[in-house]
Amino acid sequence: MDKLRDFLKSWPGRVLLMLCLAPLALLGIEGYLHGNVDPNQLAQVGDTSVSIDEYQNAVNARRSEILDQLPDPSLLNEDVLYEQVLKGLVDRKLLEQQAGQLGMTVSDDTINRLLRQEEIFQDESGQFSNDKFATFLRQRNMTKDQLFAQFRNQLSLDQLNSSIVATAIYPMQAINKLIDLQLESRHVWLHRFNWQDYASQVSVTPEQVKAYYDSHKADLKSEAMVDLAYVQLTPQSVAVPAITQEDINQQYAAYKQSIAGNDQRELAQILLTGADAQQKAQKIKSQLDQGAKFADLAKQYSEDPTGKQGGAIGRFNSSVFGQDAAAVEKALAGLKVGQSSAPVKTSFGYQIFTVLKDEGPAIASIDEMREELSAKALAYKREAAYADKVTAVNDLAADGFSLQDIAQQEGLQIKTLKNYTKENNTSVLAQPAVIKHAFDEFTIHDQAVTTGIEVAGGKVWVQPSNYRPIQTLSLAQATPTIQKLLQQQEATKLALKEAKALAGSVKSPNDLMAKSTLFSALGQVNRQSPQLSEKERSAAFSTDAPKNGIVAVVTETNQGATVLVADQIVTQNESQLSELQKAQTAGIVRDNLGQDQLQDYLQYLRVIHEVKVNDEHLKSVRGH
């Protein structure tokens, strides 16, 4: 799949199209290689249409792509995903039709040439392989003609896209001017007037509130909200049974199995059979312990053909010993090169082993690994306990149990969120996935418990109640909000008036020195200074000062008003950007302009090609 993705991204024109049409990034040729198209129409776009099958495939592909990049799957906003994908598909259809009407097409010879250059279709010698090409088509249930038609369509889109995006013009002189602006700096002194300090001087009459309500009634609406009860579960919160020796043994067995393929020990053996095999094996072991050479004893006593060569049997392979493998592994455990094992009874007879050579990793003993094995056993049991608990809670929720009953039965703690809003949610459960489930119309109607919603680190189950839909506020309901708004507006006017008076009194550096207690010296600041808000940065560089002089400017802010006193603007004599960096900056600016042109062009295409969406099919696909 990775090779296919590299293959599909290798043509610069297609890459440019995908970058410029962000919602269409999932709609490259790969998205069209599924073959069968559902005849059910989701949207009519001019003379063509978007099918339900197309839409579902595109949504699934885009969802997978986004989830691969998100640390928390609950942050995915499904509604936005659905909207972006549909817009992307419609935009693509519009461009496809326009490319066809403009006669933009690509010949078979061009497609053949491009395909032959792709590594995915080349053999070991770098030549085009008909077998690899045929396999590619067979795996995707496609014909050569279908593939060529889709490639031709994609390349035609590339041509149209380039003809729009690549025509954006922004002179290098203007680019240099933008760069110079970012290099400007000056000394700034600042004093802020907070509107709250003037709130006590403002009174808002009922008549003013009523007048504002009458003129803004359509905009004064309540937020959709519910009261939310929820339980949250993480692997760390699940009770885990104590670790037993059996758990550690299982982990050690898994460890040994994981490195079995890397066992580099070369062994020799002495095999003894017959009724007195055990006694002979004990005597031979005694001789080995007294310093006798293993190879000599193997040649003298071993009843295996390998004895003639000193008993060498090559690398250890547990599968050779079948049901006796565990006994042999136990006997070999901890043996160093040159040491011999105790006699081991196997289905072959009695065997004594020695390690001739060992170039593999050392196999630690179970005691040496006890701490690590205990941690792995605990993690395994925790994962299993967590999975069992999630299943149990989901089953209870599916059976219609209330959250209170579920919490009591499963030993969970219920938490609540009053006035949980659908929009502008800043609660601890502000993830789009949770909001979507909490405001699902069936969940609200039945006041049901949702299935487990995956959030960072665990799952959450929610049960909404006391649903309040969006509705126009009455005068009484809106009055507190209007009073605060009008109070802030009037208090800001007072703050702005005082700010202008202060600014008018500062005309020279001496005036600034006389009012030093009022102003905070920010030092040398630039257009990216984090010490200033966006409005303050704009004001700080709006007016230059005379040489050796200062200028005072006033700006209204969200907090009230600010007076900024600044000296002359200075610019670095030379940009620190290289010519290559300047060219890259110019490319970014022109690409942004080109994308604006593309959106304008798409809007024009929507006017000349009627777009109709089947709302019923759309709701069905979205699972409503």
Image: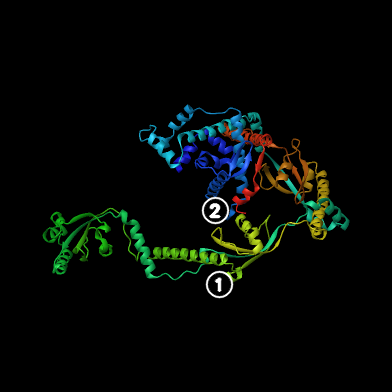
Task: Return the residue found at the far left.
Answer: 300
Where is residue 309? Give x, y as percent: 14, 54
Q: Are marks 1 and 2 in contact (CB under 8 Å)?
A: no
Q: Is residue 439 visible?
A: no
Count the labels in the image: 2
Query: Which secondary structure, mark 1?
Result: helix
Task: Decide which of tag 1 and tag 2 comes sooner along the chain.
Answer: 2
Q: Quadrant of the N terminus?
A: top left
Disc 1 marks which residue? 409
Towards the viewer: 489 or 614: 614
- Determine crowd level at label 2: few under 14, some 14-19, many 20+ residues with C-alpha closer than 10 A: few
Whole-percent x and y of residue 510?
78, 43
Q: Amino acid at mark 1?
A: Gln
Residue at 20% x, 55% y is 313
Q: To which residue does mark 2 refer?
A: 71
Query: Eyeballing the image, is 262 above or below 241?
Result: above
- In this view, the residue in front, 388 or 51, is 51
Q: Residue at x 44, y 34 (%)?
A: 118
Q: Few, some or many C-alpha atoms within 10 Å of disc 1 (few <14, some 14-19, many ≥20)?
A: few
